Amino acid sequence: MGYKSKLSWADVTPKAAYLNRRQIMAGAAGLGLGTIAGPVAAEVPLDREPNTLEQITSYNNYYEFGVQKEDPARYAHRLTTDPWSVVIDGMVDKPGTYDLADLLDGMDIEERIYRFRCVEAWSMVIPWNGFELAQLLTKVGVQPSAKYVAFETALRPDEMPGLRSPVLDWPYVEGLRLDEAMHPLTMIATGIYGESLLGQNGAPLRLVVPWKYGFKSIKSIERITLTDEEPPTSWNKANRREYGFYSNVNPNVDHPRWSQASERVIGAGFFAPRIDTLMFNGYADEVAGLYTGMDLAKFY
Amino acid sequence: MALKDTINGWARKLPTWPVYALGALPPFWYLYLGFTGGLGVEPISELEHRLGLLGLQFLIAGLTITPLRNWTGVNLIRFRRAIGLLAFYYISMHLLAWLVLDIRDPARIWADILKRPYITIGMLGFLTLVPLAATSNKASIRKLGARWRQVHWLVYAAVPLGAVHFVMLRKGWQFEPLIYLGIVLGLLAVRLLRKATRMRPHRA
């Protein structure tokens, strides 16, 4: 289990309890205030409680459905996720258009509880269901010349009202270096809390890279391309200075407009202090080796 | 014509204290919502945003009073001080929420003010409002005389600073804050245009 997560599925309470955790957490946060929270950011417990399904599905960034946090929950049900197919192409042995069922065939669906840190300095803890991206890449056969993996979100003007706004160059695209993509922490999620992903969380399948800022974890994937060149990524195209290709969670490298040293915990309530952000979102033991010798202030 | 006179008639008769009384309520309402889950799962950010936006809307409302009178003859000038003071009140609460509920750490607050352009600009906007709020009383008007109007020209700096602060804090170029900035620049432009057109005959 080691590298996968310091949290296990056993930490998640039964459904009846998590649906009602909002109140419990608010209470716990109040109790905690007296003991651990000074005026400054509190020390981060690595085994934070998972957020409730309501929190995870009501506060989202998915600009294809609008730029407000509540827009995805309001509009993402319009996304047709059945049928769904994913084009896998580029430097692979078995390129093609994979129907979702064929793509999932043979994948080991597991439950993994990951911390999720948004570039906007807020965070959640999310119990994902999904499989390691490495397993899918192995299935389609990565050719030796491939060095990067490019991803693309569905582009549905009829179903995505946010596409009318030119805030990003649509469709949304993301990318990983091949070793990042093959890392055992990197997963393709298909569910949360044992239920299928909702549109606002990137149904029917999305990337999850827990040591990078949330926008790297591209939603509703329709294309996966193996390539030998660093692929373009949407936020980097929109603002090169603010959003790098790597976008690893790093409390020492600030976003030009705000500090990344601390974060607000979603659901912690009105009086909860910010908590310190951890290097690689707390996954340094597992992933720091990927970046040995790299200047992370330069490759942000 | 008739509508304008009706409105002006009412505006002359109505007392201004209810504007203050009602205007004082929104921050308390937001706090109540925050405590009871009505501000969503990230109540502190939501509180900051709502207070800031309300402050900007009241600043803009204050800037519309004069053009409204010039174009339509509707005169709401009696309410302008209340509108301006309420804007200052909302923006002070916005700042307070950021200081006390959000960041909390004096060192990080200071670092943010110095290092984050949108926070620097927001703070500058707030500071330019302080002398306006401090001199918004009859005694100051008497004491400062003609200089009172010059002091209050600071509002032409404060409002665009607030709008720019709003544009800068969003990710990417977003529609909503740009609309606000456009309205502010428009309201400043009509003043400059009016000044220019009124000066021309004298030169001729």
Image (cartoon, grey):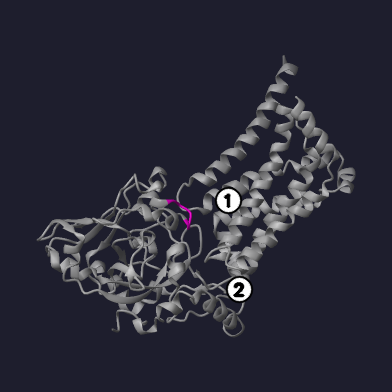
Looking at this view, is A236 or A6 the one in front? Answer: A6
Q: Residue under mark 2: which chain is it in?
A: A
Let me know if residue B63 is in the magenta part. no
The residue depicted at 58 percent of the width and 51 percent of the height is B165
Pointer 2 and pointer 1: residues touching (CB < 8 Å)?
no
Relative vertical location of residue B70 with respect to residue A162 in this rendering, above or below: above
Is label 2 or label 1 in front? Answer: 2
Viewport quadrant of the N terminus of chain B: top right
Viewport quadrant of the C terminus of chain B: top right
The x and y percentages for residue B36 are 61, 68
Mark 2 → mark 1, Cα distance in angstroms: 26 Å
Specify the quadrant of the image occupied by residue A228. Answer: bottom left
Mark identifier at residue A271: 2
- Amino acid type, label 1: His
Q: Residue under mark 1: which chain is it in?
A: B
The residue depicted at 40 percent of the width and 51 percent of the height is A65
The secondary structure that most of the magenta stretch takes on is loop
Mark identifier at residue B17: none
Left or right: where B179 falls relative to A113: right
- Amino acid type, label 2: Phe
The residue depicted at 58 percent of the width and 63 percent of the height is B38
* Helix, strand or loop for disc 2: loop
Image: magenta residue range? A66-70
**Dot 1 crowding, Cα within 10 Å, few <14, some 14–19, many 20+:** many
Q: Which residue is mark 1?
A: B165
